[in-house]
Amino acid sequence: MTTATIESAAPDAGLVSALKAVLADLVGQLNPPLDPELRLYTPAEAAVLLGVTENWVEERIKARRIPFTKVGRFNRLAARHIRAIQDAGEVDPFTRRTRRTS
């Protein structure tokens, strides 16, 4: 039984950089940059951005207490929805709540 030795050749630096450039171009064509205004978030992703649980988001969507978008049968939140939820929770420290009288 004879063993052939394979000498490892050092890759040509120019070839490697050319291949990297072609691959980067192909990946760019497959994944075009998204318009941030068109990006829709899942309830789980929105929950992370809002700092709440996914259950909190899902419950409020089900009760229709927060804005959302239906994509087919899936609930999604746009950036404007997340901003609206944040704005709705803002509390002005200089306004006083009035007492309810029965």
Image (tube, rainbow, N blue to C red):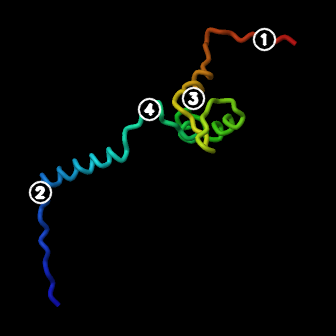
Q: CA distance from mark 2 to mark 4?
A: 39 Å
Mark 4, residue position = 36
Q: Earlier in the sequence, mark 1 or mark 2?
A: 2
Q: Nearer the viewer, mark 4 or mark 1?
A: 4
Q: Secondary structure at mark 1?
A: loop
Q: Earlier in the sequence, mark 3 or mark 1?
A: 3
Q: Amino acid at mark 3?
A: His
Residue 89, image x, y percentages: 62, 23
Say which quarter of the image contains residue 85. Answer: top right
Closer to the camera in the image, 96 or 7: 7
Q: CA distance from mark 3 to mark 1?
A: 31 Å
Closer to the camera in the image, 42 or 90: 42
Residue 79, image x, y percentages: 51, 30
Q: Determine the residue positioned at 48% across, 35% down.
A: 39
> Taking 5 as reference, is 74 above or below it?
above
Q: Secondary structure at mark 3?
A: helix
Mark 3, residue position = 81
> How many other residues sit within 10 Å of disc 3, few (<14), some (14-19) or many (≥20)?
some
Q: Amino acid at mark 4?
A: Pro
Q: Secondary structure at mark 2?
A: loop
